[in-house]
Each structure stands twice: as structure tokens, then as C-alpha cells.
Amino acid sequence: MADKSRDTSFSWMIGGPQGSGINVSAEIFAKALSRAGYYVFGQIEYHSNIKGKHSAYRLRISEQPVSSHVETVHLLSALDEETLVGDLYHEFPAHPGHAHEVAPGSAILYDREYRKFIDWLDRSDVLFWEIPYADLLEQALSEMGKPGQARAYRIMNNSMVLGASVGALGFDFEMVAEAMRESFGAKAGKVAEMNVNAAHHACDYAREHFAGKIAHRLPPAPARREQILIKGSQAVALGKLQAGCGIQTYYPISPATDESVYLEENQREHSLVVLQTEDEVSAIDAAVMAAHGGVRSATSTSGPGFALMPEGLGFAAMTEAPGPVVVIYQRGGPSTGLPTRWEQGDLSFAVSAGQGDIPRIVIASGDIEETFFDSFDAFNYADRYQIPVILLVDKHLSSSYQTMAAFDTSKLVIDRGALFDPAKNGGGEFFRHAFTPSGISPRSIPGQPGGVFWTTTDEHDPRGHITESIPNRLAMVDKRMGKMDLAGREIPDEKKFRLFGSGRTPVLVIGWGSTKGAIVDALRRIDPEGQTYSFLQIRILRPFPVEPIRELLERAGKVICFDGNYSEQLARLLRTETGFQPQHRVVKYEGRPFSEDEIVAALEHAVAGGPDRIVVTGGRVIDSDFAMKEFDRMVEMRLKHEKMLPPMVPLPPGYNR
């Protein structure tokens, strides 16, 4: 079994209703911790409604780089009863709260008004720290000249919970106060000071009553360093700006909208137009036309939106547009599915979407840093090969918040591909789809003398005129699809895949996309010397790097493949491209990303002789009966405590006493 004591990071969680500001408090705390020198990884889970339902934000705080979350919580800060005991008020209770995630010897901070729920938890191994938030808020407001208004300013409880957490952990409050003032901005000086003062009162109370009493404490702060704290959606946007993106089109859809909103906020500082269209069909068509117009173009969407875009992919491919770059923020499907939850469910769709033979490059970013560089590279590929480029990210990468070194842009070079040169035209006619030795036809930019051209979405000749000639059809299809072979030869292997370890260990772990962070962290924890496991991260899924991947697969002793979907999409792609079937396939499809603990549990289970298909959730391997057993357990808990609850929707028939 793995020695789980190696993990010295600290896990803090704040939970409460959406709209109560828990994300603001968590990100303020993350900013202060980052400035103190800590490595931080933040991960939020939230419902798809606007306000009211439960959400939770956890920070993993470490003296070493971390790229994933763990299931264990060392300090749980509760803004509502659901953080403690779950959704027992619901007709079909399905969320057990977070108290069961708290490690023995660790603590739960809660408001005095939720005292009655503590007896339900049956956690004698946990410290329960009660805070009189209402009284402390009244004191803080009185000092600010607003006595008797605690109820009206209850929204400030999120700041007080943050302050209490800081005090209980013995962290420097002034660093938090500085980050808090910055978060509110210069125009909200009085409001900011009210929140800082309220947080300070809670901090002092917690420091006096609880500091130093928790078994698991913050690790020693490492030396301060230059680092940034960034979300994946921001990194994608910055990569586009670095690449010189001229137009971003989009139709609002979760979780992709965050990136376009960020670009909208910054477009005036760059030569960028952000265009919100009437639907996703218009979004991709506008991006294709902009690419023909000579600017670097992109569109961002999620699975349901991308489902409307394959015709636009064909439009781009047939007319040999230099793009667009299409960023897909994967979420739970099918249909509307889980709008604000994670899934890696769009791999098969991305590599094959569309009617007919459509060349496209499909990139899957593994972490936030990669999203920046992959976004930049995507525009170079689009221009160089004159095909659409799809970048697969997901909700987890989009919303996670992580410390890292500033992006090194010193080696980034923009490549606009083969361009028409009027000086070399010789007064002749420009054939936009000319046959060339490379298969890439030079393209003109609107306004160039002699660069006028025809094109059409019907099959066409080199001039761009429609034809159904058999020789022309064969030559044109070969020309377009040959770009995939060209890209496969020219793109270096380090862009296509990355091998962690020697590749000659007894076990080869394979993953793609955001599984990378949890896998890397898990292997660092259970196999720091790299004696047992190697990890193969596949970064470009089309054109697939068949030969080097097949070689690594065939020399591995045991192969374990991780997929964030039900249908084992990476494992199926491996089998299709290489003929190799991984001995174990680990899947997760309940809407939350892999944690480090789940990777460890799955690897141990597989190596010990577990089944070919392994399903994980909640930090552990589960069997086929798990869902119904967990549902029944939640109903039993509700029945046990229903006399203590206010009137509720009655349980369905068959669940009455």
C-alpha cells in the first residue's frame, strides 16, 4: 500500500450557498498564500443555477508544486448547514456534506446558528470550532458607525469566515487584508474596510480560541518567489493575445464564457474584437470568414455548442481557411448534461466531428501552463496548415486557480504560413487552391494587388471554381488530407506527447487532458524514485503519433489508461490507432475531476489484480452497486434526523417508515 503520510500539503475548504461570496474569499486567501511563497492549487465545485444551491471551494497549500486536489480536508469553514450535513431537505437527498471529508484531528469552523447539526455528524475525532459570527459582525459594524445592522450586512459573513480561517491557522492577517482591499478595488474603499474590519474581528476570535490546536497545520512557508496565480480560462485567453488573435467569436455557454468575458475586459488594450453572435453556428462561420479576411480568429464553446459547429469545420477545411482555432471547454453531457461540472466526454467527437473527410489538428492541454502555450501554437498550426485546430480543455482546467512561474514567451515565434507574394506573381492569375509540392497553397490577404481569389464549399479546382471532375476530386482530397501527414512529420514529438519516467518501468500510466495534474502528483507521492510507474501524457490526438506511442505501449509490462468519461474514449482511440488494448481502464464520469487520492486508489487496485475496468469516485474505487447504496444511505440519514428538520417535501412512496 502507498505511504499516504508523504503528503505534507494542507487542504482548506470553504462551503456555502452560491452567491454568498465563497469564491471571492477563497481567491483572496489564495492570493495572500501565493505572496507568502506557498504553492497553491484551488478548485471550485458549483451548481448550474445562479444563486442559492451549495458550492464549495478548496485550496491545497504546499511548500512543493501541486497540480491537483486531494479528498481530505484539514480545515472546513462552513457558511451553511449543507456544508456540514448535505441536502437532507431535498426529496431525493444526494449530497452528504463535507464533514466526512475532514481528517481525524482536524477541525470544522461553523456559525453558532448551526450548532444543532453538529450532533448529527458523529465525528468524535474532529474538533468543532463554533464562531459567534453575528456578534462579531455587530461589533465590527458598530466600530464603523453602523450599529444594529448585522442582519442587513450578513453578506459579509464570507469575509468573516475567511478571517476566522486565517486566525485559526495562525497566518498573517495583514497579507489577507491587503489582498482583500485589492479585490474590492479603489472605488470601494469604505466597503472594503468594513469587510476587512469584520474579518479582523473573526480572525482575532479564532486566533485566541483555536490557533495551534489543530493536528495538521500549514506547512512551513517556503522562500518567497516571483510567481503568478492564474485560472485556465485566463491562460487560454493570454495565449490567444500572445499569438495575435484578431477576433474572438462566441455564444455564451458554461464554462466557456469566462474566457470570452476576460478577453472582452482586455480587448481595448490589444488589436482584438470580441464578437458575441446569435448562436454557435454564426460563431464558427464568422470565425472562418475572419480567417479568410487575414486575421487570426478563434471561437470558444462547450460540448452542446460544438455540436452545432461541425458544418463550420467542413466549411473551413474545404475552403482551406487558416483556422479558426476552436477551444472546447468540456463539461458533463450528453445534451445539457451537467453545465458546470467536469467531464472529458468530447474526445471522440472532436477527432471525428463533421461530414466527410475533414483534416483537423486536435490538441489536449494537460494543465494551466500548457493551455497558454497550446493556445499560442494552435494559431501557428492553423496558419501553417490552413486547417481548423481544436483545443480541448475542460471545466476543471478553466476554473482551477494555480500558482506557477510567469510564462516564458522569449522563444515564441509567430508563423503565418505560406503567403502570396504579389511581387512574384508576374502579372499572372492567382490560384488560391494551387497544387504545390507540400500540399499547402499560398494564401492572399484582402487588399493585396493580384490576390483576388474564388473559393467555394463545393469541390473546386485550383482556381476555386466548382467541378466534379474525378481526377480533380482525387487530387484535392489528397491535397487536403495530406496536410495531416505533413503536420505529423513537422510537429516535434515533445508537442505530441510527454513521457514522465523511463518508460521501461513495470507499469505505464496513460492519460490526457486535465488528468495530468492528479497523475503527476500521485506518482510523486507513491513512487518518488520512478521505479514502478512511468506516465505517458498524450497531447496531440489528431494527427495521432502512432509509431512512438505503439513502441511505448508494446514494451510496457502493464498499461493503465485514465479517462474522464464512461466510454473509455482514450483507450478506444489507442486501440483504433495502434491496435493496443490497455490492460486496465480507469474511468470517472460523475462530474468531478480526478483527485490525487483517486489516482492512487485506482493504481493500487489495478496493480493488485483488479478488474479490467475500474470506476472511481470520492477518493476510492467503487463497485456497480455504489450509486444505489449511497442514495439509500442518504435517505436513511434523512429519516434518522427528520424530527429535527423543518417541514420538508415528503419522501417518495417506498421510503416512508
Image (cartoon, grey):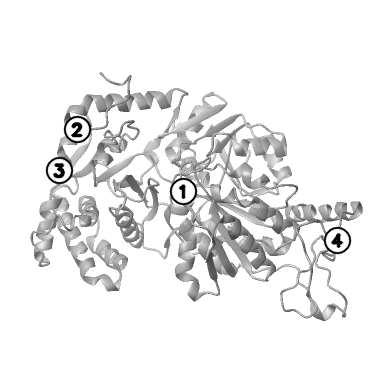
Near-viewer residue (33 or 651): 651
Q: Secondary structure at mark 4?
A: loop
Q: Secondary structure at mark 2?
A: loop
Q: Amino acid at mark 3?
A: Glu
x and y percentages locating residue 78 in the rendered image: 24, 45
Q: Report how far apart the C-alphas of labels 4 and 2 lie in the structure.
A: 74 Å
Near-viewer residue (80 or 182): 80
Numbered circle sitting on residue 645:
2
Label 3 or label 2, whichever comes before in sequence order: 3
**Mark 4 surroundings within 10 Å by alpha-carbon count, few (fewer than 14), some (14 through 19), many (20 or more):** many
Q: Amino acid at mark 4?
A: Asp
Q: Amino acid at mark 2?
A: Leu
Does 277 sit above or below residue 429? Answer: above
Question: Which residue matches tag 1?
Answer: 396
**Mark 1 surroundings within 10 Å by alpha-carbon count, few (fewer than 14), some (14 through 19), many (20 or more):** many
Q: Report how far apart the C-alphas of labels 1 and 4 lie in the structure.
A: 45 Å
Task: Tell us which disc is closer to us: 1 or 2.
Answer: 2
Q: Secondary structure at mark 1?
A: helix
Question: Which residue matches tag 3?
Answer: 113
Label 1 or label 4, whichever comes before in sequence order: 1
x and y percentages locating residue 460 in the rendered image: 83, 59
